[in-house]
């Protein structure tokens, strides 16, 4: 536990710095995927806030909108896991195959979304 | 199989013949699978051979009627179908309340066959759907067990599933019910989940979601999947087996699966709003937190990670408490805490009998008796624990999943006898694993003995050790066996060697002793195991032929002068369809609703869907009331004909008099003037001279026993209740008997219209009608009242 208030703050700073330096060391393609994930989650949050303001009348539209954002975010995370070179389990999976799987899954997801959107 | 595994290890030394044997093993496995499919199909054909190709029971008739509608009118009409021939004044939205998987599957098969110019009728397709899909289910079980343990275990599990009596009971030819395709969908979904878990491929995750969608379309039991998989994920996380493959296996399934489940009209928004699905969302959040934690642990140094952990824990705890409080408030606001009635009755077995008598009254919802486990699973009942131990020997994600599946299905099968069906695949998989491991040990011992015999003089180290002698050592590194664990533990502890064969250290592999049994013991054990399999086969075939092939719409009995066939039900429905108007309404107890609409093609008041308790209670009250009150109720519902099933003449035990107490209970649950103790004498249910006057005056008694004394010369001996009836000679004033079948099993009465002139007291002093008094438009309103 923290020894005193200032050391906690220092710890937080040190933590923040080490996180930042570790994160900037990862390759660019992973950073792009991370950006995409953050964008999708933000879109989902915006939709939830909108629903809270306006009401959820066509509930299926709301569900399909939010779940499509969450769905692509999850699939992008899966793609990131498979493409990440540091992952020992996936070292013999060519990244093209991972991307193809990602596209296929997104296709199915969006087909369902289009159907459910109403 | 032991053969294939050995040959894999033989590859470097003898390439050509080993690949040949490998290929031979593959072809053998394929042929065996084909034969298993044929076996699964054929063992379910007993009912077609003994009786005829007819649809069984009650629920399949509804599915058959829906399939007929689909094939005749196309899918858009089916999706939007509002059925007005059932639940008479209310109707039923078929498109929104039926699980479409089975119907769409059979409709598609019929359509494909028609386009190939193979003119099978819809009924034939419906009757044979279940055996075909049970063959598919065996193949799916093979695939699933292969993922867990290997080809040998897969084949054994497949052959066990093809014959397990519990599955046969719900999928004989003619049993056209949801479980026929749902069990295949269940096993296939589990196979794809385990495959995704093992390979970490997003492609299989997509297929998994699609298979889950098929399962949601087919059966209400899909909630088992959507609760079992999160439980397994949680188990893996808690036991420290989290890996990125787990994330890939679970997270897309939740999102895609919820969306696909919401697509099915029956489920709709329940997919996100009922408590049955909350477990999956909870574990979804948990797995994201865990994934993030592992990721941060991976990119930070350990010291920094400790700091991060303490920070996060203190902040996260506060957030968690807030979220949990909100969730609890939302859930607690609904009276059933968000669970549906059926799920609640599964979690708390006493719930249904206290609150929902309709759910409690269905015979398939009763808890099973102990002998039914042995009847339905036979040998598997004690092979399952052996399988559990074999699964633990190398505990992998897949085997932990199968163990969890087994434990959960055992619990639920103890609550409801219908769910023994969900236990059957798990039991087959476990037993397949156990049997396959046992066979491995025995055959390895025998091979070891044979190879040692053939080279008894060449106990050599390293260089000239031929491939098949090294095989036992290499197999040593593979799974431990239950039978050998006993021998192995003392040998490891005391460093005793098996027999006198010394294995000098070839490589580090020879640290372990070869796990073999003495050869005589293994021969004998092999023989006994084959005998065990023989017993299982004999029992399964007997169960399929004698116990589970009865179509229950046709009954047979063997007497000294041959075989008697009781075809009374179809006789009654045929009479109804030929001798009544198309728009006439028929009232009966809800058991016969589906059959009446499907075969007699008449509108019914209540049927087996039992979605409206008050409506059923109205019919129940009518059956329990005296003639006049019942007539009022039936008139208010526009009923023209009343149908009762009576088994007293021939000894058919599932007739309406035996079900009468349920009518009283359900009716009494809604209309308080019906009290169950009024119908019992000293707590006993009787229909003889000691019965209460309320019982003897009830409509059900009168309609069942009207003119019954004429059958046996004045005694009126009821063969089911084994007494003489109480009131023997009486007349019916408001009902008129129009048809009684050959063995008096179905009796149809016509509701007499309102009399034009009432003698004696005027109607004013008798107006105590409980329901509204609108008479149907065809009866003239009496101007004197």
Image (tube, grey):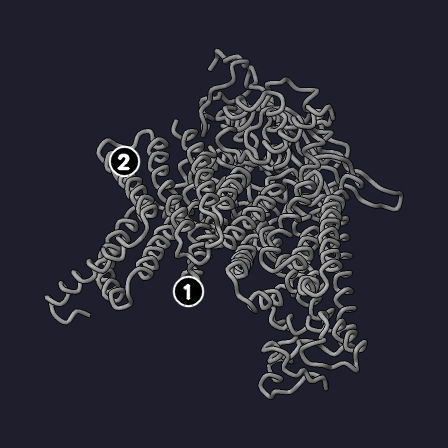
Q: Is residue B46 visible?
A: yes
* Residue B366 drawn above or below residue B120: below
Q: Residue at x 77, y 39 (%)?
A: B48
Residue B12 in percent (x, y) is at: 67, 64
Q: Distance between the residues labelled 1 and 2?
A: 36 Å
Query: Tag 1: Cα neighbours inside 10 Å, few (<14), some, or many (≥20)?
Result: few
Q: Mark 2 lies on which chain?
A: A
Of B620 and B202, nearer the camera is B202
Residue position marked by numbered label 1 in the rendering: B240
Residue position marked by numbered label 2 in the rendering: A47
Q: Which residue is drawn at 29% across and 46% down?
A: B330
Lateral position of residue B553 relative to residue B453, left or right: left
Residue B521 in percent (x, y) is at: 76, 76
* Residue A38 drawn above or below residue B635: below
- Which picture quadrant has residue B155? bottom right
Q: Which residue is drawn at 35% across and 36% down?
A: A63
Lateral position of residue B277 relative to residue B9, left or right: left
* Residue B181 drawn above or below residue B89: below
Q: What element carries label 2?
A: helix
Direction front: furthest residue = B463
Residue B288 in percent (x, y) is at: 35, 52
Residue B477 in percent (x, y) is at: 60, 71
Lateral position of residue B785 relative to residue B497, left or right: left
Please state which of the two labelled residues, at mark 1 or mark 2, is closer to the viewer: 1
């Amino acid at each position: 536990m923290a020894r005193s208030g200032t050391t906690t703050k220092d710890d937080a700073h040190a933590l923040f710095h080490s996180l930042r330096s570790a994160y900037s060391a990862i390759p660019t393609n992973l950073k792009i995927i991370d950006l995409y994930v953050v964008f999708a989650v933000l879109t989902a949050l915006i939709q939830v806030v909108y629903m809270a303001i306006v009401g959820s009348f066509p509930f299926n539209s709301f569900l399909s909108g939010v779940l499509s954002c969450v769905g692509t975010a999850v699939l992008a995370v899966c793609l990131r896991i498979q493409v990440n070179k540091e992952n020992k389990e996936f070292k013999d999976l060519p990244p093209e195959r991972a991307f193809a799987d990602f596209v296929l899954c997104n296709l199915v997801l969006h087909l369902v979304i289009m159907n459910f959107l109403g | 199989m032991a053969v294939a595994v050995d040959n894999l290890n033989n590859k470097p030394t003898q390439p050509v013949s080993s690949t040949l044997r490998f290929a031979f093993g593959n072809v053998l496995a394929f042929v065996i699978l084909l034969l298993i499919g044929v076996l699964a199909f054929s063992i379910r054909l007993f009912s077609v051979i003994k009786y005829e190709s007819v649809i069984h029971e009650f629920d399949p008739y509804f599915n058959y009627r829906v399939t007929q509608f689909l094939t005749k009118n196309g899918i858009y009409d089916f999706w939007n179908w509002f059925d007005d021939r059932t639940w008479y004044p209310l109707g039923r939205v078929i498109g929104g309340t039926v699980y479409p998987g089975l119907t769409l599957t059979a409709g598609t098969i019929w359509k494909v066959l028609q386009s190939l110019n193979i003119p099978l009728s819809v009924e034939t397709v419906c009757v044979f759907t279940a055996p075909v899909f049970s063959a598919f289910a065996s193949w799916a079980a093979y695939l699933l067990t292969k993922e867990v343990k290997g080809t040998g275990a897969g084949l054994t599990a497949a052959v066990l599933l093809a014959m397990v009596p519990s599955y046969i009971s719900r999928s004989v030819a003619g049993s056209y019910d949801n479980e026929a395709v749902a069990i295949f969908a269940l096993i296939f979904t589990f196979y794809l989940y385990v495959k995704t878990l093992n390979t970490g491929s997003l492609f299989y995750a997509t297929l998994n979601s699609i298979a889950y969608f098929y399962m949601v379309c087919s059966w209400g039991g899909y909630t088992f999947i959507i609760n079992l998989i999160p439980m397994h994920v949680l188990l893996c996380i808690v036991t420290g087996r989290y890996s990125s493959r787990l994330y890939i296996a679970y997270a897309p399934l939740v999102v895609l699966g919820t969306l696909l489940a919401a697509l099915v009209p029956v489920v709709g928004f329940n997919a996100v709003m009922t408590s049955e699905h909350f477990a999956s969302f909870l574990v979804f959040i948990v797995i994201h937190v865990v994934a993030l934690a592992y990721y941060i642990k991976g990119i930070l140094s350990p010291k920094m990670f400790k700091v991060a952990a303490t920070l996060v824990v203190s902040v996260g705890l506060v957030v968690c408490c807030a979220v949990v409080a909100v969730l609890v408030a939302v859930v607690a606001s609904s009276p059933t805490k968000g669970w549906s009635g059926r799920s609640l009755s599964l979690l708390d077995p006493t719930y249904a009998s206290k609150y929902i008598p309709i759910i409690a009254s269905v015979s398939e919802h009763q808890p099973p008796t102990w002998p039914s486990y042995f009847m339905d699973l036979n040998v598997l009942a004690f092979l399952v624990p052996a399988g559990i131990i074999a699964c633990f020997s190398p505990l992998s994600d897949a085997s932990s999943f199968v163990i969890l599946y087994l434990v959960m299905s055992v619990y639920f099968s103890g609550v409801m006898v219908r769910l023994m069906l969900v236990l059957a695949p798990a039991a087959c998989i476990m037993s397949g694993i156990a049997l396959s491991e046992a066979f491995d040990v025995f055959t390895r011992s025998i091979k070891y003995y044979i190879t040692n015999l053939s080279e008894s003089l060449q106990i050599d180290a390293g260089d000239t050790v031929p491939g098949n002698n090294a095989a036992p050592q290499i197999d040593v590194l593979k799974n431990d066996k239950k039978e050998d664990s006993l021998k192995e533990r003392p040998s490891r502890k005391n460093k005793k060697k098996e027999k006198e064969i010394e294995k000098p250290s070839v490589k580090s592999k020879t640290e372990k002793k070869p796990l073999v049994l003495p050869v005589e013991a293994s021969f004998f054990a092999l023989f006994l195991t084959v005998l065990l399999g023989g017993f299982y086969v004999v029992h399964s075939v007997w169960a399929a032929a004698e116990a589970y092939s009865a179509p229950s719409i046709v009954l047979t009995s063997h007497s000294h002068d041959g075989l008697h066939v009781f075809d009374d039900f179809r006789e009654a429905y045929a009479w109804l369809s030929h001798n009544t108007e198309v728009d006439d309404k028929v009232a009966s107890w809800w058991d016969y609703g589906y059959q009446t609409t499907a075969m007699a093609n008449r509108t019914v008041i209540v049927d087996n869907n039992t979605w409206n308790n008050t409506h059923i209670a109205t019919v129940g009250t009518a059956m329990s009331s005296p003639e006049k009150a019942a007539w009022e109720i039936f008139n208010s519902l526009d009923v023209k004909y009343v149908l009762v099933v009576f088994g007293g003449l021939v000894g058919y035990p599932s007739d309406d008099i035996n079900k009468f107490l349920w009518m009283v209970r359900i009716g009494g649950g809604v209309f308080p003037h019906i009290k169950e103790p009024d119908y019992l004498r000293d707590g006993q249910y009787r229909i003889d001279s000691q019965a209460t006057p309320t019982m003897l005056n009830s409509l059900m008694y009168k309609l069942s026993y009207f003119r019954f004394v004429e059958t046996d010369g004045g005694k009126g001996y009821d063969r089911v209740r084994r007494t003489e009836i109480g009131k023997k000679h009486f007349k019916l004033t408001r009902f008129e008997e129009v048809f009684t079948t050959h063995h008096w099993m179905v009796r149809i009465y016509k509701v007499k219209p309102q009399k034009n002139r009432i003698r004696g007291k005027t109607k004013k002093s008798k107006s105590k009608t409980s329901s509204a008094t609108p008479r149907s438009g065809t009866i003239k309103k009496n101007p004197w009242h």
